[in-house]
Amino acid sequence: MTTVVLLRHGRTSANATGILAGRSPGVALDEHGRTQASTAAERLAGAPIAAIVSSPLQRCRQTAAAVAEPHALTVATDTGLVEAGYGDWTGRPLKELAKEPLWRTVQSQPSAVRFPGGESMLEMASRAQQTIHDLNSRITCEHGADAVWVAVSHGDVIKAILAGALGVHLDLFQRILVDPASISVLRLSDTGTAVACMNTTAGDLTAMLTPPKKGRRRRRTGPQVGGGLGTAD
């Protein structure tokens, strides 16, 4: 059973000022975002992380670098984790976009949305979910079936991944909250995917992310009568 840590990048000036940064180059963490990235790194410092994969955009690479440092890991990038392609909406103020006719559809029926000159929400969700499974297969082969690894990405992308894990239709994914530098955790096994936590921003995650010692009962991800034993030893 592999464990996937989904980490959203820390805050940027675009986040703070209400600009849809999208795939714009040069969007870096602001001072508060750097603090958030450091906090995320502290929360994961004691976990046995085998690999860290990031969206190629700067804000994600900066967040990933903070997490990688205590583990002496090299951050890999994967375009499958990149921000949604917002096309002509990129770089525009959210308060301006909220007046567009398409905005209401984005909120109520995202599966019907294609951003002008950009990606559809269905395309974004499909490639993000497939990327997680492809990366998980590769990391499992390289590091074993109990590997713990981190994917650093963007709000809508992580929401789409979580929606897929929960079996929630994309039209409901706006109900999922993914704050800057928040951590969500998935457990993947042959029997399916389980969501261990979502949108957490505080607390040491070492115990949750450490596989049980050999000889002890392994945690299972499938549905269990009575709810199972949890993650405690």
Image: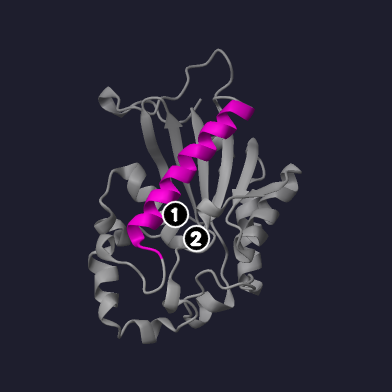
Q: Is residue 147 visible?
A: no
Q: Is residue 188 visible?
A: yes
Q: Position of residue 97 (x, y in %)?
A: 36, 82
Q: Residue at x 54, y 60 (%)?
A: 181
Front residue of 160 and 46: 160
Q: Residue at x 31, y 62 (%)?
A: 174
Q: Amino acid at mark 1?
A: Ile
Front residue of 197 and 164: 164
Q: Position of residue 145 (x, y in %)?
A: 54, 25
Q: Amino acid at mark 2?
A: His
Magenta segment includes 133: yes
SS for callout 1: helix
Q: Position of residue 73 (x, y in %)?
A: 73, 43
Depicted 96 relative to depicted 88: above or below: below
- The picture quadrant where one finds residue 48 is top right
Magenta segment includes 112: no
SS for callout 2: loop
- The picture quadrant where one finds residue 158 is bottom left
Disc 2 to disc 1, how far (Cα)?
6 Å
Question: Label 1 neighbourhood size at 10 Å, few (<14), some (14-19), many (20+)?
Answer: many
Total labels: the figure holds 2
| Label 1 sits on residue | 158
Start-end of magenta stretch: 119-142
Residues at marks 2 and 1 touching, judged by CB atoms closer than 8 Å: yes
Can you name the residue that lies furthest to the front here? 117
| Label 2 sits on residue | 154
